[in-house]
Image (cartoon, coloured by chain):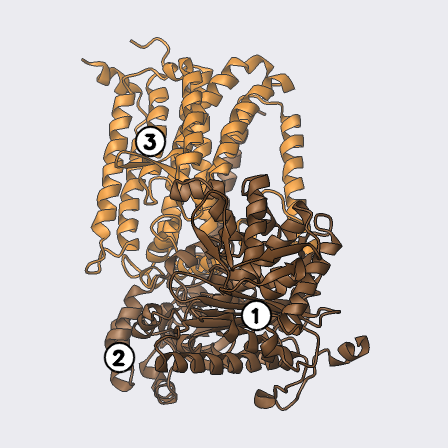
Chain colours: A brown, B orange
Amino acid sequence: MDRHKILRIVILLIFIILLSRAAYLQVIEGDYYYELSEGNRISVRPINAPRGRIYDRRGEIIVSNRLTYNLYLMQNEIPPETTTEEILTELSNLSNLSESRLLSNYHTAEVDTAVDPILLARHLSKEDMVIIAENRDLLPGLVVKESSLRDYIYPDQLVHTTGYIGEINEEELISFNEEGYNYRGGDFVGKSGLEKEYEFYLNGKRGAEQVEVNSRGEKIKTIGIKNPEAGNDLILNIDFSMQSAVEKLLQENYQELRNLAAEDEDRSVPTGISAVVMDIDSGAIISSTSLPDYNLNLFARGISNSDYQELINDPLRPMIDRNTMTAVPPGSIFKLVTGAAAMEELGVRANTSFYDSNGTFYIPNWSRPFRNWNPVGEGELDFVKAIARSNNIVFYELGYELYKDYNGEKLAGYARKFGLGSRTGIDLPSEKEGLVPDDSWKRSQLNQGWYPGDSVNLSIGQGSLLTTPVQIVSLISAVAAEGVAYKPQIVKEIKNSEGEIVKSFEPEINIDLRDEIGARVFEALKQGMYDVVNKSYGTASRHFNDFPLAAAGKTGTAQTGGANHAWFGGFAPYDNPQIAVVVFIENGGSSAYSVPIAREIMEYYFGFKNRKNYHDKVYYYNRESYQENN
Amino acid sequence: MNWNKKFLRYLNFNVPLAVILLIIIGFISISSAVEINQVDSGALRFLQKQAVSVVLGLLVVFILQAFDYKIFKEYAAVIYAVMLIMLTATIFFGRGVSGGAHWISIGAFNLQTSELSKIMLILVLAAVIDNNSDDMGYLKGMFLPSIIAFIPFVLVILQNDLGTALVLFFIYLVMLFAGGGNFKYMAAVFGGGFLLIVSVITAHVTLETPLPFLKEYQLNRLIVFINPNIDPHGSGYNIIQSIIALGSGRTFGKGLFAGTQNQLNFLPEKHTDFIFSVIGEEFGFVGSALVILLFLYLLWQFLNIAENARDRYGYLIVIGVMAMFLFHVLENIGMTMGIMPITGIPLPFISYGGTFMLTSLTAVAIVINVNLRKNKLMF
């Protein structure tokens, strides 16, 4: 057959099909669809999914949800004879809801079709809910739906780590939905901390109820329900009984130090304090505290602008997590790095002898004196004792020798090996990477070359070196475990609402120096840290008097030009290291204030002091294993 | 200057008549879809823009008659090169509208390049098939046209414009058939390909095997018409609402501006993709049958013009244009009736949209050009 004729037949067939379908829908089934369009219609109402909850390592709930009720407008349920504005005016007359708020929420809502619900009001009062239910016939198209509201069991604890939530912004809405998620304007999303880091796990999947409504906007029956999926729960490595104890301890010390400073002009005023406790064998963060903080409840319902302004303009910066977002010089804690470099590169040994004649060090041919914290010469001391005494003169000399032999690059390289100058990768957003200064940095930033004085300064952790407390806890952990440190990790596992594990975080090695730095180096450094705490001449021994367990640590007092930052980094037990602890006091004046706090944290951890204050049950965490080992 | 008169002797007046009627129906339905009867609807803006495209399109219709369509064949290579450059440029510099990057801006004028590519492909394919007409019964003759069609097809797919890609494919298929392509090969390749696609999708839906090329939401849009309840809140909802709108128009319709589905915003994209639902709701079966028959009438005239074309090139061009409109009509109207997948391609002459109106009128202009020059001895 002629192809042209075939085309004609195919086209005729296609049009006959279209025509028949139109006749079927409009003539034969017309009355049915007419009924549907004029009388009953189908509407899809949202069912909100609760956000995932947060538990501590023992399954104690830290962040939960409570029920709240939101008011939605379903435009397509509004009968043709009324307008949305009329209904909203009626609603504001009947209830306590403000007309201007309702109208502005209605007019600013961005919806694609009339099918999409518009959020008119959140957290309805009981009274308003009763009013809406009783006047349903006057208020077609208005639907009250359950929603969840963050419920903080301890709104003032673990604040920075948990993080706050807030209404999704335009930018987030676009980028999240481009990634394939289904967010809507008005949704709450994590803005900081774990809430932000694990947003896509915590956020649930919205469900929907397909209903048939009549011409008055009344629901006749439910046609179908798609159940919402609750968000996944986070199980943390945090031990909440530890957390509470440390929170209280830091709070008391912070207040006391500020009070003392208020009375005594010579004392520096601390502007913040933080502590982090990490499990050396896994990187699990057992507690993380940063003060000053804020109250998470401020954010649960959406923070008011004035409250938010107050928080971000507070000079004490309560929104900053000092453990991950504050990078300052670490002071003498850095001597551990200088020591490792000196032993590896300069042939220094644990018993290598040094001499401090008058507490002052001069770089050959330079006139500027570098002084020890102790103005009197300390005479002859070996390398280990130099750590225990935190003797600057010895480390100035080592720093200068490293400069002479390797032109300043060597020490910076060791600092980087210990993880300084880069993020630890802790599972929190906005972690700072700090800074390890070197020649190229100095040239690009200050337009100057690297001088021997820079190396000498760096050797005792001063100058442009910047570290965060979580980097220091990682450094301490690497020394304690003789070259290995795990990535700090707050979340242990993620479970779905049925309790099945969705994701489990295995310990991940972050720093591995076993091939680069010899065991004798770590032995000497650890011996020095032991002496810091346990020998009468150790810089922290005064505050560890009668401590029932062999601990080790290193003090740090970092000069900033203003008040000094106080540091202490330690681990325990000495022969079988389990935890690394770092205490940091911003503008704290002297490490003398950070050491006793670290001691108390260890006492809480090993059960020498109970943490009953917040919990009925007292845990002696790992005490059995500790006793077996000793 | 009496060439107009000589030309007009041959003009098939049914073509402009049907087109003008369809455009008028389009203006009326768009007015209703954008709610011109309501205060502050902003509807006039839509109508003004649509009117500008119609005027521009009619200008093209007149100007194009001054050239003999054989120049398209002479410049086929150039047209093809321009098309490829245009489509490639859109991928890199295009601006997206709901998940696709189909627009490029020339000054204040936004051009949907994939629309123009339809006509360009017709002109080029006709030339290639015409040149290979002796070999069309063999694989070697079918090879070049297939390559020529395949490249722009892929470029349009990369723009995420599945609808237009399908139009291009349909044009290619019909032109290959009309151009004498070997039917056995075509049936084997395209029938086999169709079966393959159907089985891959069936396997994905029932056995959850991975899905190549398509994203999940694209597949859902494609297959939701089979069962709107797959996705009753998304595309399925649109189909349900569209069918309710059409059906509720019954035999004589609810009357202009009286369609509740339309006026209450139940219908999605009602001034563009779902304009036929508005017509069906407000003018009933009488209205939808009129539109369907007008399209049949128009395409029938195209087939007559093709048959009487001066040469094979003219024949193939008109068949290509016919195929383009046929697919648009079948796909768009079929979609609103729930018998075709949702791909978001507009209804010619009726849907709101400047570039496609311009494309459609240019296509008509080319058909008229062939029509006017049907006598080989014309001076």
SS assignment at label 1 = strand
Residue B20 picture location, percent across and down: 28, 37
Q: Is the residue A28 above or below the residue A19 in the image? A: below
Q: What residue type is labelled 1?
A: Val
Left or right position of B196 against B316: right
Residue B25 visible, this orientation? yes
Observer-side mark, 1 or 3, equals 1
Chain-order first, disc 2 or disc 1: 2
For marks 2 and 3, give the CA distance.
60 Å
Residue at x 41% of width, y 39% of height: B102
- Residue A523 falls in image quadrant: bottom right
Observer-side mark, 2 or 3, equals 2
Q: Is the residue B101 above or below the residue A157 in the image? A: above
Give neighbour class at mark 3: few <14, some 14-19, many 20+ (Cα, 10 Å).
Answer: some
User: Which residue carries the number 2 mark?
Assistant: A98
| Chain letter of disc 3 in the image | B
Q: Do labels 2 and 1 share a chain?
A: yes
Residue at x 23% of width, y 52% of height: B43
Q: Which of A468/A212 is in front?
A: A468
The residue sitting at the right extreme is A628
User: Which residue carries the number 3 mark?
Assistant: B15
SS assignment at label 2 = loop
Q: Which of A48/B53 is in front?
A: A48
Left or right position of A328 against B370: right
Residue A193 picture location, percent across and down: 50, 66
Q: Which amino acid does label 2 sit on?
A: Ser
Give neighbour class at mark 2: few <14, some 14-19, many 20+ (Cα, 10 Å).
Answer: some
Residue B81 picture location, percent across and down: 44, 21
